[in-house]
């Protein structure tokens, strides 16, 4: 149950009525979403009786309420508000029902007034009359104008009369609509049925009697066909019209519907040309039916100038045909009764042909005009759709709007200091005080303001709010080229459409920016969470082990056996090394991310790097069988020894972490084209196919069943960064047996520099070809010997023998 004073939209109304600001309000959407609304209506006297009896509030609170808010006058006003709100809801439901069931209507359950204006100064009087009628009946009202093809031939002054009347209606609180069609009465009746109008107000101007013979006026058609409506006809008064005419209306009324003199000149020329062609056809070709020549002239005049010129050519053609080509010639006498019928038929055909030709011409012009308007909107949509950033959208908006109205355009958007001009064509950087106030009013209230509107009409600019479902995104300002130039109804509709599309385009680019920012924030948050999780786990675990071992040694050193003390010291060493690797990974990742990693290249042997990595990981791999497969004739590589060694350490460390204890690890080195491929293969559970690329992302770890493997998810990311810095590649796949993981590092082979001349000659230790005397597998045998030593528990690698196999580094 909700009291009417708690609706948000009525808060200011309640404050004016009761003089008290209601603080507890709910949005109107609560009632809009309700399936049913039931009005609980009590007379003010009965409600005050309930208050005094303590049925609403406790006695003390009830007295204060009756003395302040719940007075008889306030309760009466609140009662009316509640009934009106419920009536509007029911009325909306009725209209939806009529539209859903295609009921033509009207159902006169509520007064609605529609006034129909024309292209004349009488439209002002009709608007004011409808306003007074709507006020007396407390009814909503609508002002319509039917735009026919004849509207395009009207002069600009007459079109301005229509624009002024529609603006006046909007200022007086009416809803306006511009209809399109050739049958004025039919369009008005269709709109009246759709809006469930109860009364139609039209004007009846004085028309010449001969015009009534050819066409029925829209007013007469409404009286004939609108029996279901109350039609109120307001007769025109020349004196009242003159008083209501705006500047230039007299000239406009005189020019309205009058073709220019050049069209009449073209009509006379066509008549002369038809007469000459008729003489040529009569004398040279001896044609029997010359009327078709004059009919062609009528058609040409109608296509060019419309009805007036075509009627002029029809009359001239009729007289010329009768005078020059019908017996007796050179006289207008008619001696044959059949000629009377022929002349009448010719004149009627010429008049009808001219009239229909003029109608077709107007319709063609209207079609072209509609096509241009559609092309204009399509071109605008295409431009703003292709704009990727906000600046491109704003430039397209102001440039297209300025071209469409033949004037100036600008867009204002909210900044920290208020509304600011963000785009203008021609470039504009400031507004006068009145225009700036109109722009702010349009932004704050979401309605049109400025020139010739209901708010600050004296401003130089007209401002339209750019609104979407999310709220206002900006303000579009337009100014016509001339100081007295006003927007036509057609330009107003086009401007509304362009403003709607511009608002959507601006919101789209804003949303793209917001989405990108949100994505970056989400990614940053994800990385932060992963980093904190890794640090909390991978830092705390070794620190706890080190702290525990140190505490035990300090507390129980005398009681511990030497073997126990050595074991605790080794634990401290192992955990410190693990902590050092973790910190080194973070530092390497930071260097990679900032672009500070610059490899220090030198010519190295890949087998040296593998041997050094195995030596540093001897404790991790000491219990695992190793299978090392190295092709013969490996070239030297131009690499950073320390960085590639870190790559091999990370890959081997991963293989130990993600495979069962005691399982085999295979290292395979081979040459493929211009690359050396180093593969490390384990016998673990493997990496799912959809995650083989993601394992190289920072802080990403494959989710495995059972206990989670320790690690930060940085090892392979660092590997890829280092290898790509050398121009190589790193990939993950399954091994040949279909299980486990194979990490393959591809390193490029560079052109080796030529040896110095003093090294070209063989020495005592070289063979005749200048090569080492060892066989091709000497390096492989040396690494295997190192592996055997490493795998002996606790054993250190053997000392290097400078004379053995010519490889002091092994």
Image (cartoon, helix red, strand yellow):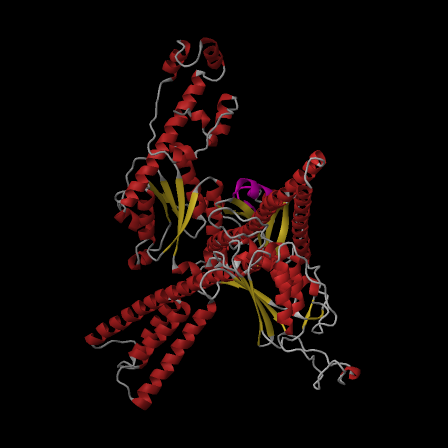
696 with respect to 366 (left or right) = right
**Count of numbered tags:** 0
Q: Quadrant of residue 3?
A: top left
Instruction: Give the x, y percent position of residue 716.
Output: 59, 58
Instruction: Give the x, y percent position of residue 752.
Output: 69, 78
In which quadrant of the rendered image does the N terminus lie? top left
Instruction: Give the x, y percent position of residue 312.
Output: 37, 69
Q: Tell me, yes or no, if residue 413 can be seen here.
A: yes
Q: Residue at x 32, y 81 (%)?
A: 324
Q: Residue at x 39, y 60 (%)?
A: 149
In which quadrant of the rendered image does the C terminus lie? bottom right
416 with respect to 260 (left or right) = right
Q: Is residue 235 above or below residue 609?
A: above
Q: Quadrant of residue 666?
A: bottom right
Q: Residue at x 39, y 27 (%)?
A: 82
Q: Tell me, yes or no, if residue 481 can be seen here.
A: no
Foreground residue among 114 and 575: 575
Foreground residue among 435 and 317: 435
Magenta stretch holds residue 718: no
Q: Is residue 110 above or below residue 734?
A: above
Residues rendered magenta in the picture: 440-455
Magenta stretch holds residue 448: yes
Q: Is residue 329 above or below residue 403?
A: below
Instruction: Give the x, y percent position of residue 674.
Output: 60, 76
Foreground residue among 603 and 508: 603
Q: Residue furthest bottom?
A: 284
Foreground residue among 389 and 570: 570
């Amino acid at each position: 149950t909700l009291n009417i004073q708690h609706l948000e939209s009525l808060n200011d109304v309640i404050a004016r009525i009761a003089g008290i600001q209601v603080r507890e309000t709910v949005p109107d959407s609560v009632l809009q979403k309700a399936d049913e609304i039931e009005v609980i209506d009590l007379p003010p006297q009965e409600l005050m009786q309930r208050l005094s009896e303590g049925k609403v509030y406790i006695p003390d609170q009830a007295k204060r309420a009756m003395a302040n808010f719940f007075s008889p006058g306030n309760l009466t006003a609140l009662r009316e508000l509640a009934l009106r709100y419920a009536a509007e809801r029911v009325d909306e439901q009725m209209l939806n029902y009529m539209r859903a069931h295609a009921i033509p209507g009207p159902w006169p359950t509520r007064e609605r007034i529609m006034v129909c204006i024309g292209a004349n100064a009488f439209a002002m009087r009709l608007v004011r009359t409808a306003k007074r009628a709507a006020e007396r009946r407390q009814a909503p009202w609508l002002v319509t104008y039917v735009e026919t093809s004849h509207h395009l031939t009207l002069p600009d002054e007459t079109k301005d009369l229509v624009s002024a009347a529609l603006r006046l209606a909007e200022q007086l609180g009416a809803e306006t609509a511009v209809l399109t069609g050739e049958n004025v009465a039919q369009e008005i009746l269709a709109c009246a049925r759709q809006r469930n109008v109860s009364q139609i107000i039209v004007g009846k101007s004085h028309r010449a009697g001969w015009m009534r013979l050819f066409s029925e006026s829209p007013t007469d058609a409404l009286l004939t066909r609108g029996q279901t409506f109350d039609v109120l006809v307001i007769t025109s008064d020349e004196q009242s019209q003159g008083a209501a005419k705006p500047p230039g209306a007299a000239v406009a009324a005189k020019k309205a519907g009058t073709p220019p003199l050049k069209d009449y000149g073209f009509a006379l020329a066509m008549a002369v040309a038809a007469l000459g062609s008729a003489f040529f056809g009569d004398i040279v070709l001896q044609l029997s039916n010359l009327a078709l020549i004059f009919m062609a002239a009528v058609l040409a005049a109608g296509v060019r100038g419309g009805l007036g010129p075509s009627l002029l050519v029809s009359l001239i053609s009729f007289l010329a045909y009768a005078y020059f080509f019908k017996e007796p010639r050179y006289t207008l006498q008619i001696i044959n009764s059949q000629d009377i019928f022929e002349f009448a038929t010719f004149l009627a055909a010429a008049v009808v042909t001219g009239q229909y030709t003029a109608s077709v011409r107007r319709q063609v012009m209207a079609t072209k005009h509609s096509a241009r308007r559609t092309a204009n909107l399509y071109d605008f949509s295409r431009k703003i759709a292709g704009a990727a950033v906000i600046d491109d959208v704003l430039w397209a908006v102001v440039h297209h709007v300025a071209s469409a109205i033949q004037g100036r355009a600008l867009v204002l958007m909210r900044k920290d200091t208020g509304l600011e001009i963000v785009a203008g064509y021609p470039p504009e950087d400031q507004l006068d005080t009145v225009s700036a106030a109109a722009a702010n009013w349009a932004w704050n209230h979401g309605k049109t303001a400025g020139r010739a509107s209901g708010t600050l009409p004296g401003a130089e600019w007209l401002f339209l709010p750019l609104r979407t479902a999310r709220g206002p995104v900006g303000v579009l300002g337009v100014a016509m080229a001339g100081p007295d130039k006003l927007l036509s109804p057609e330009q107003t509709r086009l401007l509304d459409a362009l403003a709607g599309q511009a608002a959507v385009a601006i919101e789209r680019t804003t949303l793209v920016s917001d989405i990108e920012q949100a994505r970056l924030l989400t990614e940053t948050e994800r990385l932060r969470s992963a980093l904190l999780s890794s640090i909390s786990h991978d830092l705390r675990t070794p620190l706890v082990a080190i702290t525990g071992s140190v505490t035990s040694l300090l507390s129980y050193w005398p009681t511990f056996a030497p073997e126990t003390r050595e074991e605790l010291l080794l634990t401290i060493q192992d955990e410190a090394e693990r902590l050092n690797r973790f910190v080194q990974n973070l530092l390497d990742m930071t260097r990679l991310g900032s672009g500070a990693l610059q490899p220090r290249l030198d010519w190295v042997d890949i087998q040296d790097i593998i041997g050094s990595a195995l030596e540093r990981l001897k404790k991790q791999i000491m219990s695992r069988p190793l299978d090392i497969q190295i092709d013969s004739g490996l070239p030297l590589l131009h690499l950073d020894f320390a960085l590639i060694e870190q790559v091999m350490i990370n890959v081997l460390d991963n293989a130990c972490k993600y495979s069962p204890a005691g399982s085999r690890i295979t290292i395979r080195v081979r040459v493929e084209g211009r690359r050396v491929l180093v593969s490390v293969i384990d016998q673990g559970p493997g990496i799912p196919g959809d995650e083989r690329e993601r394992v190289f992302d920072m802080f990403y770890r494959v989710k495995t069943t059972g206990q989670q493997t320790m690690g930060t998810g940085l090892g392979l990311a660092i590997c890829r960064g280092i290898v790509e810095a050398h121009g190589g590649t790193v990939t993950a796949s399954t091994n040949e047996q279909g299980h486990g993981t194979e990490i393959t590092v591809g390193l490029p082979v560079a052109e080796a520099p030529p040896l110095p001349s003093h090294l070209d000659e063989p020495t005592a230790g070289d063979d005749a070809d200048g090569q080492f005397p060892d066989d091709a597998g000497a390096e492989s045998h040396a690494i295997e010997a190192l592996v055997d030593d490493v795998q002996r528990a606790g054993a250190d690698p053997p000392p290097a023998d400078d004379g053995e196999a010519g490889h002091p580094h092994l």
